[in-house]
Image (cartoon, rainbow, N blue to C red):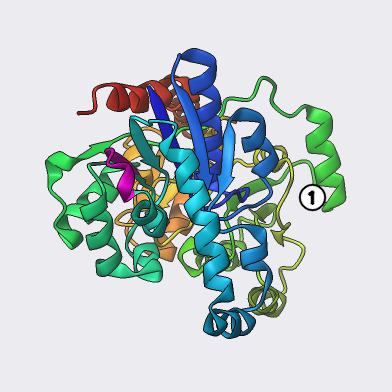
């Protein structure tokens, strides 16, 4: 089978990383062949180029100019003519490939799918987005168009499937659910790595560390994490409790979040350490992991934390993480109920045996049910049985 993959970009973020890993697994374990279209490029272009023949839908010269310059060039017709010529040549090359299937990796690729409609081949769209992200990219009209372009949907959680059915009237038999996975590292960080991080941030050895991770988006709940940290640290039994967030922020957002931390007088205990090349090094320190998101389709960072036998705290009605946590891998808290999150932290700190039990359950669930091998086979089954 020849598959034409589409990724919205090549950034070092969830969806492109997951697609890169799936294409690699597919080529190593099957006879299926894949070609890739990147809607726009990014840092993972080199990785994709090593794996498969890769095309850029909006080439670098198209995205080079500021929007106002693009508008002026479009008025002259030259810019549009050049892009049309580029696309015509790309389509000519793709038609020669005789693809059997298009696999689109997010909701953002409707323009690419429109471009490819003359290939007249079925389309699988993998949905990794919930409603605030859908609204950001076009809302109901976007999904209506995507539904007309798509033959089969894969949702990365039941929460995503329910949203597509309830909010967007997608037929339930058009949607299959395949939960997300994590790459299982061959080796976990050594003790010396943990010691270096503790020394870098002046974290004492006997501390209880609550971790979180995510980009600087409102839906990721970094403000809720700060509120939880302040409320917890102000209790008398938490002198040795530290909070660490792994992930980057826009400068204006970082100014705001650090304002609250400074006013609380807890700069030494509430640490925002930025994006890390090896985030698992930090995850290895965590005693408890909070997925603070208001909305999260599934929550890969939670499963990465679980690799270290770490229980997870998350919000109900906030996406797919409760589907993983269940009753035995952590605690699910009523939506945005900060006092209940503080209670959950207290529970795990005061009950190390329960923390160990749930942490072990979480790790075992990742290893058994959420590996690249397991989930790639599920996606492959959908692809191979697709009519």
Q: Is residue 151 above or below residue 30?
A: below
Q: Is residue 120 magenta?
A: yes
Instruction: Please provide percent x and percent y for residue 315.
Output: 37, 55
Q: Residue at x 59, y 65 (%)?
A: 216
Q: Position of residue 42 (x, y in %)?
A: 65, 52
Position above or below: 318 against 289 = below
The N terminus appears in which quarter of the rendering? top left
Residue at x 24% of width, y 22% of height = 385
Residue 170 horizontal/vertical position (percent) = 16, 52
Quadrant in the picture for the C terminus: top left
Instruction: Reply yes or no: does residue 24 show up in magenta.
Output: no
Most foreground residue, 44 or 15: 44
Res. 326 in view: yes
- Determine the residue positioned at 34% across, 52% down: 319
Badge 1 density bin: few <14, some 14–19, many ≥20, Cα 10 Å: some
256 vs 303, left or right, is right
Of 331 and 308, nearer the camera is: 308
> Height in image: 136 above or below 85?
below
Q: Locate residue 312 relative to residue 251 in the image: left or right.
A: left
Residue 76 picture quarter: bottom right
- Name the residue beneath numbered marker 1: 203
Which element carries disc 1, helix, strand or loop?
loop
The residue depicted at 63 percent of the width and 56 percent of the height is: 238
Span colored in magenta: 117-125
339 lies left or right of 155: right
Looking at the picture, tell me which residue is in the foreground, 73 or 253. Answer: 73
């Amino acid at each position: 089978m020849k598959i034409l993959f589409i990724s919205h970009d090549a950034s070092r973020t969830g969806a492109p990383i997951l697609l890169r890993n799936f294409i690699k697994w597919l080529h190593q374990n099957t006879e299926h062949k894949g070609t890739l279209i990147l809607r726009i490029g990014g840092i993972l272009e080199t990785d994709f180029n090593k794996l498969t023949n890769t095309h850029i839908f909006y080439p670098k010269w198209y995205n080079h100019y500021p929007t106002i310059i693009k508008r002026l060039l479009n008025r002259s017709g030259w810019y549009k003519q050049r892009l049309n010529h580029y696309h015509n040549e790309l389509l000519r090359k793709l038609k020669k490939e005789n693809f059997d299937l298009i696999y689109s990796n997010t909701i953002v690729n409707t323009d690419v799918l429109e471009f490819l409609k003359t290939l007249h081949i079925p389309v699988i769209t993998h949905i990794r987005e919930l409603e605030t992200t859908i609204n950001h990219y076009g809302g109901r009209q976007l999904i209506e168009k995507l539904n007309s372009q798509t033959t089969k949907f894969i949702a990365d959680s039941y929460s995503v499937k329910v949203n597509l059915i309830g909010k967007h009237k997608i037929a339930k038999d058009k949607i299959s659910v395949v939960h997300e996975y994590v790459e299982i590292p061959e080796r976990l960080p050594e003790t010396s790595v943990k010691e270096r991080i503790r020394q870098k941030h002046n974290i004492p050895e006997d501390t209880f560390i609550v971790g979180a991770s995510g980009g600087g988006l409102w839906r990721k709940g970094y403000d809720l994490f700060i509120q939880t940290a302040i409320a917890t640290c102000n209790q008398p039994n938490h002198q040795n409790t530290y909070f660490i967030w792994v992930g980057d922020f826009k400068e204006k957002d970082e100014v705001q979040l650090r304002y609250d931390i400074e006013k609380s007088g807890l700069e030494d205990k509430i640490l925002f350490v930025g994006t890390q090349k090896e985030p698992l090094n930090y995850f290895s320190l965590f005693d408890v992991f909070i997925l603070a998101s208001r909305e999260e389709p599934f929550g890969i960072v939670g499963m990465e934390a679980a690799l270290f036998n770490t229980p997870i705290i998350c919000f109900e009605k906030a996406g797919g993480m409760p589907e993983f946590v269940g009753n035995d891998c952590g605690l699910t808290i009523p939506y945005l109920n900060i006092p209940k999150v503080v209670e959950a932290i207290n529970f795990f700190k005061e009950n190390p045996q329960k923390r160990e039990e749930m942490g072990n359950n979480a790790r075992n669930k990742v290893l058994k049910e959420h590996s690249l091998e397991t989930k790639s086979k599920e996606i492959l089954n959908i692809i191979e049985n697709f009519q």
